[in-house]
Image (cartoon, grey):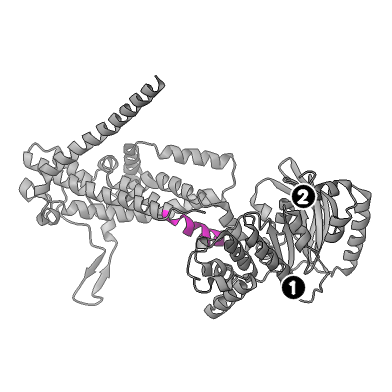
């Protein structure tokens, strides 16, 4: 009898796994069938257009790149810094317990709430308008708890014997952290950051709330440009204050159009987004395996 | 406290008091003056030292004298506080929250629990080898070079020379000289532990603390390590905590027997093992409990 129950449960389990996989496979197949023929060079180098067959994702992928790089630049130092403080320096008392619980809670707040915060704080109060910077700040807030939590986890996984060994040869706290603990935790920290970024790259709601535009026929000012006269190469961060769109918003916009052609554009955009996410997650898994250590 | 112990300890304290150099607390207390220390001079002097984790008092009024360039072993049953005592000598217990130390530990006459003492400087002078080999997850070379670099040695040639010297001192050089860039974790347990010894020696400490360094090693690796410890005594003062009484008998000059946080007996190793003054010491070393 117990053996039969065991077997029944096994089949229920297999069924549950298959159901999820099949639904996913059907979705992916459907999207690929619709969108794959649309994935041409022109699709990547064209701006959005009112004619579906001419529309492309140039401004969307460039915008996504801008947003991701800026978000990473904001999140990585803040997240790792906060995690190091909480894990290595902060005294263990009620106050830090309180902070800890709140960070865990923040990781679960719906993203649209961050959008509203970003709209009020960055777009309006700080006059960033609907810029790359405002979008990145909002996404940075959104993924910051994830980065902090995963970095703390990574630091905690470094055995205390490593810290003791460093202290025993006369390391200060920072020398122990920078010389031994951080390098030992590097792989896991990087994994956490990549997973946080792959979450950020697909976020639509907060950016829509922020008022990111859906039709952008130009790119943010490039960070590096070449000119024929001195100084020949110009560096500029003006692009941070330019308006932007990102892939998920572009897709969202196309899906809501009535024309069939835009649905095909959306499918092609989804493929691009899926591939990026897949690459990021794959990199995270690879790093996790590579840096697995036996202490 | 037991009368014999008191009398003996008192004599030692008096002797130590007389030979104690009158060091004032300065920023340079650990700069040296050890070079002119003679063999047998008091190196570590523990005076009525108590230590507690929260409400749990693990060391009670312990007194003990460690002399320069001797091997002093601390034995006792599990949980008697011997590791705690050892970890007080380089204040490794500071890493644990809610601890409290009373009484004094003087190293070369300097109270190491004085709030003005720089713990980082103290640890440069009092090296440590741990129970479980704990090499850094880095190359063999970097395992040793790390300590040198954080101690401000920048010159590549000097780092290379001192890495080699400490590997020779720890009798590991011949085994690893062709694979210095391999991970420290790729070595066998015994080799890892000798790497940890080399790491401790590289920064030229004066005292080396060893916390059951052979407990994770096989007999052959243990024999090698013991040989090494006896050899190191020429240059260093060694305090070793061990579970293994034969080991204490083999390698140490003085032995301290600790039980339930109290110093039961302390003296010349041979005396402790051949004619212990306390019944309980005799029972412990003959293996009737522990």
* Left or right of A192 in this view: B246: right
Say if residue A56 shows up in the picture: yes
> Image point 58% across, 61% down: which residue?
A166
Residue B241 drawn at (x, y percent): 72, 56
Say if residue B111 shows up in the picture: no
Which element carries disc 2, helix, strand or loop? Answer: loop
Circle 2 sits on which residue? B76
User: Is mark 1 in CB contact (under 8 Å) with mark 2?
Assistant: no
> Image point 64% across, 55% down: which residue?
B131
Task: Please report the bounds of the magenta region as a residue range.
Answer: A174-187
Q: Earlier in the sequence, mark 1 or mark 2?
A: 2
Output the chain of dot 1: B
Residue A268 drawn at (x, y percent): 14, 46
Mark drawn on residue B234:
1
Output the chain of dot 2: B
Snapshot quadrant of residue B216 = bottom right
Q: Is residue B65 magenta?
A: no
Which element carries disc 1, helix, strand or loop? Answer: loop
């Amino acid at each position: 009898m117990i053996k039969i129950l065991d077997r029944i449960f096994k089949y229920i389990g297999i069924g549950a796994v298959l159901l999820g996989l099949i639904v996913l496979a059907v979705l992916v197949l459907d999207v690929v069938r619709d969108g794959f023929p649309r994935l041409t060079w022109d699709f990547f180098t064209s701006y959005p257009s009112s004619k579906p067959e001419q529309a492309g994702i140039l401004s969307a992928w460039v915008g996504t790149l801008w947003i991701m790089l800026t978000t990473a630049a904001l999140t990585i130092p803040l997240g790792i810094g906060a995690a190091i403080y909480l894990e290595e320096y902060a005294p263990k008392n009620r106050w830090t317990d309180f902070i800890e619980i709140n960070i865990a809670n923040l990781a679960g707040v719906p993203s649209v709430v961050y959008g509203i915060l970003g709209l009020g704080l960055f777009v309006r109060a700080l006059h960033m308008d609907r810029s790359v910077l405002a979008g990145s700040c909002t996404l940075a807030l959104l993924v910051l708890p994830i980065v902090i939590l995963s970095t703390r986890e990574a630091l905690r996984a470094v055995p205390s014997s490593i810290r003791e060994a460093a202290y025993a040869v006369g390391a200060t706290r920072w020398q122990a952290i920078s010389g031994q603990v951080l390098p030992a935790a590097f792989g896991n920290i990087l994994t956490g950051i990549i997973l946080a970024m792959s979450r950020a790259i697909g976020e639509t709601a907060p950016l829509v709330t922020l008022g990111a535009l859906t039709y952008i026929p130009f790119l943010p000012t490039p960070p590096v440009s070449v000119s024929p006269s001195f100084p020949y190469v110009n560096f500029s961060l003006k692009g941070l204050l330019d308006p932007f769109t990102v892939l998920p918003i572009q897709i969202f916009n196309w899906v809501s159009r009535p024309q069939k052609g835009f649905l095909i554009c959306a499918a092609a955009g989804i493929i691009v987004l899926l591939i990026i996410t897949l690459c990021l997650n794959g990199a995270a898994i690879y790093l996790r395996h590579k840096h697995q250590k036996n202490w | 406290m037991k009368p014999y112990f008191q009398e003996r300890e008192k004599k030692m304290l008096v002797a130590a008091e007389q030979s104690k150099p009158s060091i004032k607390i300065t920023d340079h207390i650990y700069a040296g003056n050890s070079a002119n220390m003679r063999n047998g001079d008091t190196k570590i002097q523990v005076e009525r030292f108590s230590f507690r984790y929260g409400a749990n008092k693990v060391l009670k009024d312990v007194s003990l004298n460690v002399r320069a360039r001797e091997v002093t072993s601390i034995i006792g049953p599990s949980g008697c506080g011997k590791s705690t005592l050892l970890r007080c000598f380089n204040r490794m217990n500071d890493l644990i929250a809610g601890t409290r130390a009373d009484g004094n530990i003087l190293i070369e006459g300097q109270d190491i629990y004085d709030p003005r003492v720089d713990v980082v400087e103290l640890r440069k002078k009092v090296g440590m080898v741990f129970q479980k080999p704990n090499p850094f997850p880095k190359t063999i070379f970097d395992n040793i070079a790390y300590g040198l670099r954080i101690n401000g040695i920048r010159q590549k040639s000097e780092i290379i020379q001192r890495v080699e010297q400490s590997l020779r001192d720890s009798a590991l050089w011949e085994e690893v000289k062709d694979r210095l860039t391999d991970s420290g974790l790729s070595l066998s347990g015994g080799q890892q532990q000798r790497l940890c010894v080399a790491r401790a020696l590289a920064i030229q400490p004066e005292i080396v603390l060893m916390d059951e360094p052979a407990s994770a090693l096989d007999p052959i690796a243990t024999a090698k390590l013991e040989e090494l410890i006896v050899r190191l005594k020429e240059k260093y003062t060694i305090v070793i905590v061990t579970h293994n009484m034969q080991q204490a008998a083999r390698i140490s000059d003085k032995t301290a027997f600790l039980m339930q946080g109290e110093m039961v007996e302390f003296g010349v190793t041979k005396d402790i093992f051949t004619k212990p003054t306390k019944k309980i010491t005799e029972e412990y070393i003959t293996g009737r409990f522990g």
